Each structure stands twice: as structure tokens, then as C-alpha cells.
Image (tube, rainbow, N blue to C red):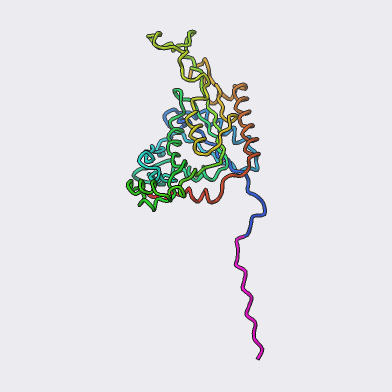
């Protein structure tokens, strides 16, 4: 009797490979607190600049944008709880102190899926005002909540979500070196901050007109000879976290110097050709850098930025 040959083993079905690379992905964020439907009654210059930049980015790119401005009825970004100070392994990536759509601790960071959107993008452009020699409170809150991107624990199951003693034990263990990493490594961040040079509040002596004791105020002792340094904490946090901030993409502009705040609005800025030229040049440098650098973010990065908690 002739032997019947065994059927050949079938080749496993594999997912198809993309025939071309995906477009570059960019996230543009406006960091001012102002929105027209909140107490200020007007939208910010940061929002106007965000839309101006979005309109100038290459049409073949995938452009995402967000305005962090405060709105009535919308959650705020919750403050960081400083888990990292108890143990690096207690600081979970992405943050599990809060979760999306929470009724008890509503958090804009999660409700806007900012962890996922930051992970999805190859580059970020961040635009915001200088407030009292520093970044806006909304940007500061967002970056405080990104401490987990620099070495945070991707395995909260190993510490029963938030067990401090287990987290400390994990951090001391040999396996911690295999877990900890910079989760947003390799991306580009660009910063553009703007100020008003003191608006119309300074006298000829560069001291505030309203200050009664002029001898208490020495303008030569102001902390920053370069106003862009107001954002240095955010820039260096990025660099420390493996996120590239080229010096050419860290810039400052001045709008409304010498005029009342009432006359320094987004509509007024639209007529400031010199000020906008500096912003547009920053945008062009951003385009050139990101195009040359190419794709950075992976699907695995985006998947790893999903919430692991509901609170």
C-alpha cells in the first residue's frame, strides 16, 4: 500500500507589514490659564500662537493640539503627590495616583489622555506665558505629573498598586534595573515663552511704579538676564528625562511692552509683525529639526501609556 504523505505544515498567518512609514506626529500645547469661557473672558495669546503654529506645520504630518486653559466645569490637572520621594518604584508610569473620568478626584491629565498623546507624538511644541519669572501653573502641574516618565515603575502589579514598603523593596532589588527607564526617551520638545517686559508698570528707573519703598527693589538683581530662563526648569526636566531640547528650539518673545494689559491681547499681538516674526522663525526651526530627526515614537510606547487604575 502506498504511503500517504503528511500534509506540509502551514505557514503561520502573520500581520501585514506597512508599505510605507507613518507620518510624523507632533503635539502642540498651549499652556496659559486663560480661556474665554472662564473668569478672564478672553482667550490667551498662547492659544492664538498654538493655532498659528498648527497652520504652518507640514500638511502631511499628523498634528495634535491641546489648550490647557482653565474652563468652568472642566477638571484641572491634579497635583503630583511626590511618590518618587518615598521610592522611585512607587512612582508608576503612567501615573496611577489618579485615573480617567474619576468622580472623586477628576484629573485633566487623564481626561485629556495627555500621557497617551505625549507618548504617541515624535515631538512636542509647548507655548506659554512667563508668570512671575516662571512657567504657567498649568504647565508646572503637567510637568510635575511627568516625573514618572523619568524612570517610573511600569509594573504597578509588583507593588499592589501603591504599597510603599513593597516599592522600596523592589527599588533595592536587582530586577529594578531591568524595569526602570525613561519612558519618553528620544522625543523632541520645543519651548516658546513670551513676556511683556513689565507692561506699563515700570518707571524710568525700571522699578515698579506702585512700589513705595524703591530702595527695596534693585532691578539689577532680577534673576534672569535672558527671559527664556523662566522655563529652564521644564527644559532641564526634559533633558534629564532623555527628551531632546535643542538650544535653538528654546525661545522667548515679547508682546505688549509698555502698554496696559487691556491693550495686550491676542488681537493686538496679531498686529505685532516683529514679535510674530520671531515666533514664526522658531516654528521653522522646529519643522527643520523634527523632519531631519524623523520618527521616534512606537506603538509600544503608546500602549504602555494607558491607565492602570480607576479612582
The answer to which image quadrant residue 65 occupies is: top right
Residue at horizontal 45%, vertical 15%? 221
The answer to whether residue 226 is left or right of residue 111 is right
Magenta stretch: residue 8 in it? yes
Q: Quadrant of residue 57?
A: top right
Which stretch did the figure color magenta? 1-15
Instruction: Tell how many labels.
Output: 0
Tell me if I can see residue 37 in this picture.
Answer: no
Q: Position of residue 126 (x, y in %)?
A: 53, 33
Q: What is the quadrant of the N terminus in the image? A: bottom right
Decide whether the magenta segment is chiefly helix, strand or loop: loop
- From the viewer's perspective, tell me whether residue 45 is left or right of residue 290: left
Which of the 4 image quadrants contains residue 56?
top right
Which of 60 and 234 lies nearest the eye of the viewer?
234
Q: Residue at x 53, y 51 (%)?
A: 300
Q: Which residue shows up at 65% across the image and 41% down it?
A: 59
Question: How far across and down, in percent of the image, does residue 289 sit?
Answer: 63, 36
Residue 6 x/y as whole percent:
62, 80
Residue reaching furthest to the front: 174
Residue 247 in view here: yes
- The percent coordinates of residue 204 (x first, y second) are 49, 8
Q: Nearer the viewer, residue 58 or 293?
A: 293
Q: Is residue 231 magenta?
A: no
Which residue occupies the foreground of this view, 164 or 54? 164
Amino acid at each position: 500500500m502506498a504511503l500517504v504523505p503528511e500534509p506540509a505544515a502551514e505557514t503561520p498567518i502573520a500581520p501585514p507589514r506597512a508599505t510605507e512609514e507613518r507620518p510624523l506626529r507632533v503635539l502642540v500645547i498651549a499652556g496659559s490659564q486663560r480661556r474665554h469661557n472662564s473668569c478672564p473672558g478672553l482667550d490667551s495669546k498662547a492659544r492664538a500662537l498654538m493655532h498659528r503654529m498648527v497652520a504652518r506645520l507640514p500638511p502631511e504630518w499628523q498634528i495634535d493640539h491641546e489648550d490647557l486653559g482653565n474652563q468652568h466645569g472642566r477638571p484641572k490637572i491634579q497635583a503630583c503627590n511626590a511618590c518618587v520621594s518615598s521610592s522611585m518604584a512607587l512612582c508608576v508610569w503612567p501615573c496611577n495616583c489618579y485615573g480617567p473620568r474619576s468622580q472623586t478626584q477628576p484629573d485633566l491629565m487623564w481626561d485629556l489622555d495627555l500621557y497617551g498623546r505625549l507618548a504617541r507624538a515624535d515631538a512636542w511644541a509647548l507655548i506659554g506665558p512667563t508668570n512671575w519669572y516662571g512657567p504657567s501653573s498649568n504647565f508646572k502641574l503637567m510637568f510635575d505629573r511627568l516625573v514618572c516618565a523619568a524612570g517610573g515603575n511600569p509594573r504597578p502589579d509588583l507593588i499592589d498598586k501603591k504599597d510603599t514598603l513593597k516599592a522600596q523593596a523592589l527599588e533595592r532589588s536587582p530586577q529594578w534595573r531591568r524595569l526602570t527607564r525613561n519612558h519618553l526617551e528620544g522625543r523632541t520638545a520645543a519651548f516658546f515663552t513670551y513676556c511683556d517686559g513689565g507692561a506699563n508698570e515700570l518707571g524710568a528707573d525700571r522699578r515698579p511704579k506702585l512700589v513705595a519703598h524703591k530702595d527695596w527693589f534693585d532691578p539689577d538683581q532680577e534673576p534672569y538676564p535672558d527671559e527664556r530662563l523662566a522655563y529652564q526648569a521644564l527644559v532641564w526636566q526634559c533633558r534629564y528625562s532623555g527628551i531632546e531640547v535643542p538650544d535653538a528650539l528654546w525661545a522667548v518673545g515679547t508682546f505688549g511692552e509698555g502698554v496696559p494689559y487691556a491693550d495686550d491681547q491676542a488681537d493686538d499681538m496679531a498686529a505685532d509683525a516683529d514679535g510674530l516674526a520671531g515666533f514664526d522663525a522658531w516654528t521653522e526651526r522646529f519643522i527643520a529639526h523634527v523632519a531631519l530627526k524623523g520618527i521616534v515614537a512606537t506603538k509600544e510606547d503608546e500602549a504602555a501609556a494607558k491607565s492602570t487604575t480607576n479612582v
